[in-house]
Image (cartoon, rainbow, N blue to C red):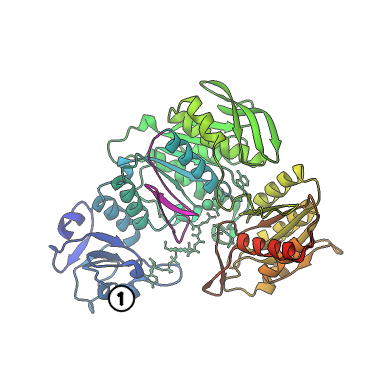
Amino acid sequence: MRLKQLVQPLLSYEIRGNEDVDVETIESDSRRVGPGALFVAVPGFTVDGHAFAGQAVAAGAVALLVERHLPELDVPQVIVNDSLRTSAVLADILYRHPSQALRMVGVTGTNGKTTVTHIIRHILEFARRSTGLLGTVGGVIGGRSFPVANTTPHAVEVHGFLKQMVDAGCTYGVMEVSSHALVERRVAGVDYDVAVFTNLSQDHLDFHGTMDAYAQAKSLLFARLGNTYGEKRRDSKFAVVNIDDAYAPVMMGASVATTLTYGLAETADVRASDVVLTHLGATMNVTTPFGTFPVTTGLIGRFNVYNVLAAIAVAVVEEIPVATLQAALSSYEGVPGRCERVDEGQPFGIFVDYAHTPDGLENVLSSVREFAAGRVICVVGCGGDRDKTKRPLMASAALSLSDAAIFTSDNPRTEDPERILDDMEAGLPAGSQYRRIVDRGEAIKVAIQEARENDVVVIAGKGHEDYQIVGRTKIHFDDKEEARKAVRARLSDNSF
Ligand SMILES: CC(=O)N[C@H]1[C@@H](OP(=O)(O)OP(=O)(O)OC[C@H]2O[C@@H](n3ccc(=O)[nH]c3=O)[C@H](O)[C@@H]2O)O[C@H](CO)[C@@H](O)[C@@H]1O[C@H](C)C(=O)N[C@@H](C)C(=O)N[C@H](CCC(=O)O)C(=O)O
Ligand SMILES: Nc1ncnc2c1ncn2[C@@H]1O[C@H](COP(=O)(O)OP(=O)(O)OP(=O)(O)O)[C@@H](O)[C@H]1O
Ligand SMILES: N[C@H](CCC[C@H](N)C(=O)O)C(=O)O
Ligand SMILES: [Mg+2]
């Protein structure tokens, strides 16, 4: 599209240079720029994107969207007050309003976003509704998977992914919407039809400051249901909210859409009763506005009953037939790195899980505790350059809900891993019994060497991640690989 035509709908801008250049893509990261790109210079938290405009031009950028003119660069420049906000508008235009062409489902909450989005996609695909997915584990478009750097990427990437979904013939776009993304306007211009709230508990206070500010950030997704940019009908927009969560009223208060609540409460529109939890998953009866029916899932733990209910509520909104829904749920095998079993024939259980908040860890450990015939052994660490106040809470959850806890490293990033462990230990009662093994591979090995028949080892925090971030470098590291290695070593030693 010609630059002139692209920027024409903007209310306020100044353009310098040739307006007739052809723009094919929009990029906000110079490292992603190729020929034909409009490079957006965004003043970030750590660096100013304007400093990378030269690199972008060298990589083929044909024009710049800037907040100040860069006289040293001889390419057309569009000057605006807010390059981030404008870039979302332009990406939406350039890619022909992809979020209006899709039925858009956004899922937010502290825990469960990845799980719920994956279950929703599975149900929709099972019902033969082609669905694109975007979130922590990556994106899936038309059977092709690709990695993403953030749970919710920058706005121009979001619109770019949605365009790929439309091009691939998807009718649905299902995505995780993180609180960072809502504050940083990474979903600006996305027209959502369904917003889902899973829960709110402590995380990211380094970024949001208080729980109230964190809740307000999440509620922005529900406020977005009031925005309709194209042909979509306001009366087919829905807020799907976990009514058992204390912050449910904040989400409902922000929304002008029809609310569908879910939970275990009698008052929930979609509710589970007669829940039976086992080591193989759960069975329950689910009541919806259209009737009551039995549901079986292979996902373990009460928290996953909530995740399943959230997905069922979306299926109700989307009018998926009950029989299809039941079959989809009973055939669903789970999300990579969420309570994922590692089975090398050892006589005890091993779960690799992504619990990285106090609530997540409490949930997974108490769920495992319910069916573990032996001891529960937990290996856990806390991320560097992230909320420090969750560290002692996670350590305390590990200590109180497992029989043996090993504290270790989880993406120390630019922090000293030993200091992160100090933060975890601070506040634990004197005389607490736990181990501190900074090397995560060694910690996993020790846990597996010590496991006896019927014990369950939970390796928490990294789930699907196949790296350890040390400093600013990503080193290959995979909990599942390490666990398998340790089990095989025991098998070859004949030490079972
Ligand atoms: C604190 C935070 O949210 N940071 C995000 C923010 O970075 P920033 O504003 O600091 O960007 P910056 O590094 O200063 O760079 C400014 C601009 O220069 C550009 N740049 C930078 C370097 C370069 O070589 N070339 C270049 O063009 C950048 O692309 C950017 O546009 O904007 C970037 C682009 O969108 C994000 O990648 C980055 O996420 C960082 C990596 C991060 O760790 N974020 C975490 C906290 C996060 O967002 N997590 C949530 C999940 C939370 C959850 O689900 O629990 C997520 O959605 O992933
Ligand atoms: N509904 C839930 N309530 C509490 N804990 C949960 C829930 N669902 C999942 N968990 C726990 O949280 C972990 C992360 O789950 P999931 O990846 O689905 O969450 P997320 O919200 O996508 O996380 P992230 O913020 O990293 O994107 C799981 O491995 C599990 O231990
Ligand atoms: N989305 C979460 C993931 C945390 C995963 C954990 N492994 C860590 O690095 O802290 C975050 O960015 O805080
Ligand atoms: Mg996620």
- Residue of label 1: 55
Residue at disc 1, CB closer than 8 Å to ligand 1: yes
Amino acid residing under circle 1: Gln
Which residue range is magenta in the image?
128-151
- Place of residue 35 in the rendered image (x, y in percent of width and height, measured from the top left): 23, 67
Identity of the residue drawn at 20% across and 55% down: 6
Instruction: Give the residue at the far top of this rendering.
Output: 291
Q: Quick check: is 39 in the magenta stretch?
A: no
- Place of residue 241 in the rendered image (x, y in percent of width and height, measured from the top left): 53, 36
- Residue 340 vs 270, above or below: the answer is below
| Quadrant where the C terminus is found in the figure | bottom right
Identity of the residue drawn at 45% across and 28% down: 320
In the image: residue 370, left or right of residue 327: right
- Place of residue 184 in the rendered image (x, y in percent of width and height, measured from the top left): 43, 57
Q: Element at badge 1?
A: helix
Q: Quick check: is 133 in the magenta stretch?
A: yes
Identity of the residue drawn at 15% across and 64% down: 21
In the image: residue 30, left or right of residue 62: right
- Place of residue 387 in the rendered image (x, y in percent of width and height, measured from the top left): 61, 62
